[in-house]
Amino acid sequence: MKNHCFIPLSVMAFFLALTASVHAQDQLERYDVFVGPSYVHHDIGHVPGIDVAGTLHLSKIFGVVGDFGLHRSGDLFGSKLHVYTYRFGPKFSVRKGSVIFIGQALGGASHITGATYLSGKTLLETTLNEFNYHLG
């Protein structure tokens, strides 16, 4: 049995360590970058993947966010699923002492491709594009 999750998780942990950001209270950071693990819920279950997001801070309270994700399932009950997401939107932040409260509303799309296999032969392939959003 192959351990196909070890390499993606190791890569995600490496990038997560690289994206640590330090905020000085008096200084405005021009941008933030995040790379880390992510999960998407679909009809066949949760699909693991990686998420890359960047924020360009235009002022101390307002920024613009771009968020991109890649999620791939292994062979799950004879089905494979690939989900690509991209979202954009505003981000608001308020500093209280050393704590930063944030809120964002992102909208975008998902590109989903899936295939169903039986005995190594493809029975069905499908592609779907859908609207998606993130509030947080």
Image (cartoon, rainbow, N blue to C red):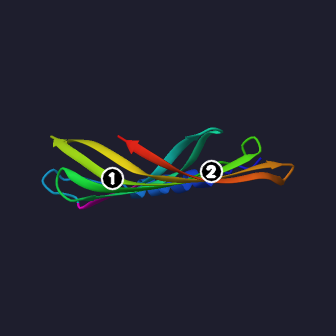
Can you see residue 4? yes
Foreground of the two, 31 or 110: 110
In the picture, measured across the screen, residue 61 lies left or right of residue 115, that is left
Identify which residue is drawn at 19% across, 53% down: 24
Q: Give the range drawn in magenta.
A: 30-34
Q: Does the magenta stretch include residue 31?
A: yes
In the picture, measured across the screen, residue 95 lies left or right of residue 121, that is left
Main SS class of the magenta portion in the image? strand
Mark 2, residue position: 6
Identify which residue is drawn at 48% across, 56% down: 14
Identify which residue is drawn at 66% across, 39% down: 44
Mark 2 nearby-residue class (10 Å; few <14, some 14–19, many ≥20): few
Foreground of the two, 124 or 97: 124
Q: Does the magenta stretch include residue 72?
A: no
Identify which residue is drawn at 15% across, 57% down: 27
Mark 2 to mark 1 CA distance (whole Å): 33 Å
